[in-house]
Amino acid sequence: MDYQAILEEIKNEIQPFLNEGKLANYIPALANVDDKEFAMSIQLFDGTSYHIGNHNLKFSIQSISKVFTFTLALNHYGKDLYKRVGHEPSGNPFNSLVQLEYENGIPRNPFINAGAIVTADSLVSIYKKNTFNTILNFIKKTSNDKTLTFDEEIFNSELAHGFRNFALINMIKSFNNINNNIDDVIDTYFKQCSIMMNTSQLSKSMLFLANHGINPLTNEEILTVSKAKRINSLMLTCGHYDASGDFAYKVGLPGKSGVGGGIVAVVPQKMAICVYSPKLNLQGNSLVGTKALELFTTKTGLSIF
Ligand code: DON
């Protein structure tokens, strides 16, 4: 298959959609980007990669970080983790508070903000003051890239405007599902969201999920086969919040989005993909990114269905 030609076609076909959607503005620093950017990377198991657009441009990975933190936590706690965070789609926005109260502070899944905050808390219990460094080092390992850092300005912007996340963590704490100091946990969560990566780095970092938990470039086992299956399933059913059904319907791949405009997707046994375009649809997922991935699976037939 001529992946480069397919990427060129996709770039042409998404042009009209670059006018649609809106930048995330509830974190002011996220609005400081060129809203017409588009980049897409495909990473194969043999190290070959294909790119279109500005694939060296870094953006904050935001909720894509939740895949890495959940991987770390699942590796450590195994199925005990599900006592604190579920594995059902929420059908609600990523920052919603409503279910948490009547479900006793147990978030529906690890990819909504509430679930990622509980996951961050579970990591703070293990790694204490070293939690963020452990997360960053883990992402460096999966992407085979030692240069990754987080963006102070985005981190501070989230901290200054994170009213919803503070409400979530306080609500969860009231149900005794946060074991550590709120500020330590929220600091970890905001820092993981403000890690900066480009589509090339992100597509590499997801390869282990396409290959039964083993990074095909280094042969390192990141996760067991069974746990890799679980995370892919969660990406398919919960990776796009209340648009997860729509993403599965249109794209047909496990995927995870972030409000920074990135989406990662996994083609089992074949490749990992990352697309970036910062304007979002109503559910907070990259509008053009979703369209580009839909075009990709339509043109290649590479969906899981
Ligand atoms: O906590 C927040 O609201 C953001 N740091 C992350 C949310 C997010 O990426 C939702 N994604 N599409």
Image: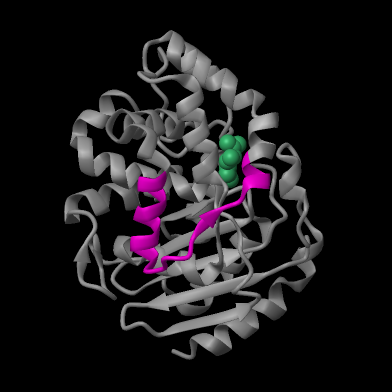
Residue 56, horizontal then vertical, whole percent: 60, 73
Q: Write the residue at 63% across / 55% down.
A: 261
Query: In the rendered structure, does residue 98 fall within the stretch colored magenta?
Result: no
In the image, is 72 to the left or to the right of 32? Answer: left
Q: Quadrant of the C terminus?
A: bottom left
Q: Quadrant of the N terminus?
A: bottom left
Which residue is more in the foreground, 81 or 244? Answer: 81
Which residue is more in the foreground, 29 or 4? Answer: 29
- Looking at the image, can residue 240 be seen? no
Residue 172, horizontal then vertical, whole percent: 45, 16
Question: Farthest right residue?
Answer: 19
Residue 47: quadrant of the picture: bottom left
In the image, is 25 to the left or to the right of 248? Answer: right
Q: Is residue 105 above or below residue 94?
A: above
Residue 105: quadrant of the picture: top left
Range of residues picked out in magenta: 133-155
Q: Main secondary structure of the magenta part?
A: helix
Residue 211, horizontal then vertical, whole percent: 26, 67
- The quadrant of the rendered image in which ligand 1 is seen is top right
Residue 231, horizontal then vertical, whole percent: 32, 48
Q: Is residue 6 above or below residue 262?
A: below
In the image, is 268 to the left or to the right of 169? Answer: left
In the image, is 182 to the left or to the right of 58? Answer: left
Q: Is residue 102 above or below residue 261?
A: above
| Colour convention | one colour
- Looking at the image, can residue 92 be seen? yes
